[in-house]
Amino acid sequence: MKPRDILWLLLWTAGALVSFSATAVAVRLMAHTLSLFEVLSVRNFAGLAILLGAVALRPELRRQLRPGKPWLHVIRNTTHFIGQCGWNSAITVLPLATAFALEFTAPIWLAAMAVPLLGERLTLPRAGAIVLGIAGILVILRPGHEAFQPAALVMLGAAVLFAGVAVATKRLTRTVSTFTILFWMNASQLPLSLAGSNLDFPSRLDAAGWTGAAMLAVTGLTSHLCLTQAYRYGDAVVVMPLDFLRIPMIALIGWQFYGEALDPFVFVGAVLIVVGIVWNLSAEARRAAPALAEPETGRGPAPAPDDRAR
């Protein structure tokens, strides 16, 4: 890897870390005045407005507004919307570090789902990632312990749904662009979120709420953008450990601004989860290396989707 690529990798990863953390803080800033659906309305409206603005500035993007496979967009976006509801709900109740650590289990569930849904083999690294992921979850949640919070199950459910979204996204990337996926995600989810909202909700935002809305409008897209760009400059095996720095960062934010304790069990469990993910990614990279070394057939690999970023 060239020094310049390393620099860009670090910069894009830093942008992703800041964006993801700011998104969680933005949701909390709005949650005391807005409902769950109203918070999602802000995010979807802002995302759609920015994407339509891009179309106005670059008319050639209009060709990318064709959905390609409408039924797959419906499945993906409905699942993603339910997962978003769970994520936004849990992030206002759970300690931020716990919520982010549990969200990191999405690649574990994706590895499990890829076997029946994508016809991929259950290799030893995949099985090991699943086992380590479950062990990490048990360390974080400590079932039966007084520290256990039922909202953690909501975040786990959201992570499972996000894994399903990643499977649908992987299929979509074979035929449509990232811009198309993001556009139809916001366009289809905006009516769903508005249906559960009181349309006067902007009038209920106070100064903190407007700050959160402005943050969410930006980070809702920059989190996806920065992490996607990081994957362009580095392999997933490199990006994943860097992305893991989100957990200590958000833990410090929770401790500093919300008085949340720095729970060592969360960090131990998160390390188990990430070690399993990196083990599986390393094995996948080694397995893919011979295929990449073969002569080109005119058809490149589809870009890897990322749907952990909320």
Image (cartoon, rainbow, N blue to C red):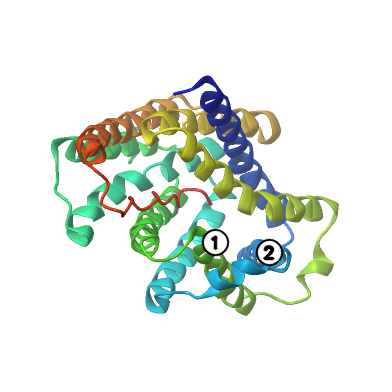
**Camera sees residue 22:** yes
Q: Nearer the viewer, residue 268 or 119?
A: 119
Residue positioned 74% across, 51% down in the render:
212
Residue positioned 41% across, 67% down in the render:
76
Identify the amino acid type marked 2.
Answer: Arg
On residue 179, the disc is 1
Task: Judge whether 186 appears above or below 216 on screen.
Answer: below
- The answer to whether 139 appears left or right of 18 in the picture is left
| Residue furthest out toward the top | 3
Residue positioned 74% across, 60% down in the render:
33
What x and y, as percent, mark residue 298?
Answer: 30, 54
Residue for badge 2? 58
Q: Nearer the viewer, residue 150 or 187?
A: 187
**Camera sees residue 148:** no
Q: Circle 1: is it few (<14), some (14-19), or many (20+) Cα within 10 Å?
A: some
Q: Circle 2: is it few (<14), some (14-19), or many (20+) Cα within 10 Å?
A: few
What x and y, as percent, mark residue 196?
Answer: 61, 76
**SS under mark 1:** helix
What x and y, as percent, mark residue 43?
Answer: 65, 61
* Quarter where residue 4 is shown: top right
Task: Judge whether 60 appears above or below 233 on screen.
Answer: below
Marks 2, 1: nearer the viewer: 2
**SS under mark 2:** loop
User: Is the C-beta separation of discs 2 and 1 under 8 Å?
Assistant: no
- The answer to whether 39 appears left or right of 162 in the picture is right
Task: Judge whether 52 appears above or below 250 on screen.
Answer: below
Counting residues from the N terminus, which is met first, the one under dot 2 or under dot 1? 2
Identify the amino acid type marked 1.
Answer: Phe
